[in-house]
């Protein structure tokens, strides 16, 4: 029997690989899917197609922002008739849960991170307390809680006294770069350049200041940054302060269709998450798996979930990033040893046979579709 699925997300679902991959897999399982999402970088007119709707919001975190978001989301949810509703983040959780219960449907909560414990709330106890209270109330009313790693599942089960978590890691589709970007030609870089890559949102706690500081002692390194975010202007100031403007390239946001080609063009992928919150300590970011899929050796923090993947599949190095000299030492070692980099690259391609969305979805599809 065909199932009707509704997915709600405060963000542009078309630019979110987790939602796109989930939607495509559900369609392949004969589900009819409707996705409600939001963006602040599109034209004034909403985007519509058979599956996706993207509504325009003004990116000003104010009462008006949340009222408009709430009104549009509730209006659209009331129009839907679904067997299963997905709240794809904390912000949609209350509205989706209320409507799903009203319509006597199942509701799943995608806890992409530990929202009450993200780095941005660590010095904002009042807001953190509000998030905890809201999440504690609604998380006990959903049928499944989806997480991106085992540590997140264990934490939520213990903290909120629940037992219904399912792990679906942020893993890309199994595919290979078809036309790898040549950064040396594209940006007229010296042939001996050792190209470091950071891809993802530009936020506090992602290790970018650490790598910029280390680059002062690594004269052949060039850093390519793929992505955008609230800390971009601060990072640009750091680049200028360190006199690195000729060696750091802010390449902007790359479409999901092209991203793999850009990822594959670098020499070393960076995932230097800092231990500034419980959520970050548990980090198992999408970029780690995207690097592996692209055959790009990884330099990651030695936080437990990332370290486990890097060491299990031997795809790079997991290091203590609190030691500034250690970052410099390891990058210099990898720059000098192309054979070691090649070994890590080969291991990435082997690991990708396990670490891909198709395998990940197949592990949980029966539970998601309530087939068990």
Image: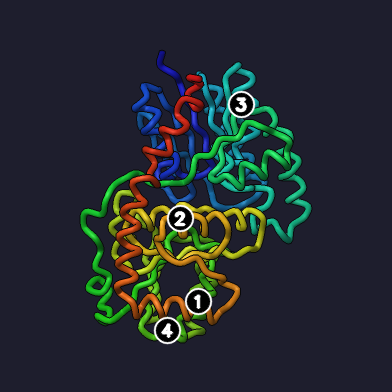
Please name which of the two marks, 2 or 4, marks the residue nearer to the observer: 2
User: Is residue 60 visible from the viewing direction of this image?
Assistant: yes
Residue 207 % position (x, y): 53, 68
Real-space CA distance between mark 1 and mark 3, rounded to the nearest whole angstrom: 43 Å
Tell me: residue 314, above or below residue 158: below
Point out the tag, 4 or 3, that comes first from the N-terminus. 3
At x 49%, y 44%, the residue is: 169
Q: How many marks?
A: 4
Secondary structure of residue under mark 1: helix
46 left or right of 194 in image:
right
**Observer-nearest residue: 154 or 114?**
154
| Residue designated by label 3 | 143
Real-space CA distance between mark 2 and mark 3, rounded to the nearest whole angstrom: 33 Å
> What number is the disc on residue 209?
none
Real-space CA distance between mark 4 and mark 1, rounded to the nearest whole angstrom: 10 Å
Secondary structure of residue under mark 2: helix
| Residue designated by label 4 | 218
Residue 362 % position (x, y): 41, 32
Real-space CA distance between mark 2 and mark 4, rounded to the nearest whole angstrom: 28 Å
**Residue furthest out toward the top:** 1
| Residue designated by label 1 | 327
| Residue designated by label 2 | 312
Point out the tag, 4 or 1, that comes first from the N-terminus. 4
């Amino acid at each position: 029997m065909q199932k009707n699925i509704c997915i709600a997300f405060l963000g542009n679902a078309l630019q979110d690989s987790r939602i796109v991959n989930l939607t495509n897999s559900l369609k392949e399982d004969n589900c009819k899917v409707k996705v409600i999402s939001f963006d602040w970088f599109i034209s004034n007119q909403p985007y519509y197609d058979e599956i996706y709707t993207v509504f325009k919001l003004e990116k000003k975190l104010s009462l008006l922002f949340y009222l408009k978001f709430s009104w549009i989301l509730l209006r659209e949810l009331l129009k839907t008739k679904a067997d299963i509703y997905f709240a794809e983040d904390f912000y949609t959780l209350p509205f989706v849960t209320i409507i799903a219960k009203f319509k006597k449907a199942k509701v799943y909560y995608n806890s992409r991170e530990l929202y009450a414990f993200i780095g941005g709330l660590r010095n904002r106890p009042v807001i953190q307390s509000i998030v905890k209270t809201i999440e504690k109330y609604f998380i006990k009313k959903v049928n499944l809680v989806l997480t991106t790693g085992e540590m997140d599942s264990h934490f939520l089960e213990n903290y909120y006294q629940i037992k219904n978590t399912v792990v679906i890691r942020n893993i890309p589709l199994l595919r290979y770069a078809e036309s790898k970007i040549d950064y040396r030609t594209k940006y007229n870089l010296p042939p001996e350049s050792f190209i470091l890559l950071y891809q993802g949102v530009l936020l506090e706690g992602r290790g970018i200041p650490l790598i910029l500081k280390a680059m002062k002692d690594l004269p052949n390194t060039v850093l390519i940054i793929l992505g955008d975010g609230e800390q971009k202007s601060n990072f640009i100031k750091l680049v200028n302060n360190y006199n690195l403007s000729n060696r750091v390239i802010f390449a902007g946001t790359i479409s999901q269709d092209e991203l793999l080609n850009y990822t594959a063009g670098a020499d070393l992928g960076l995932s230097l998450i800092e231990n500034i919150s419980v959520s970050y300590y548990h980090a198992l970011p999408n970029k780690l798996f995207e690097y592996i899929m692209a055959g790009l050796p990884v330099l990651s923090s030695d936080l437990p979930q990332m370290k486990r993947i890097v060491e299990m599949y031997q795809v790079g190095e997991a290091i203590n990033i609190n030691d500034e000299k250690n970052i410099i030492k390891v990058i210099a070692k990898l720059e000098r040893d192309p054979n070691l980099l090649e070994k890590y690259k080969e291991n990435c391609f082997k690991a990708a046979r396990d670490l891909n969305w198709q395998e990940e979805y197949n592990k949980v599809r029966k539970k998601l579709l309530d087939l068990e």
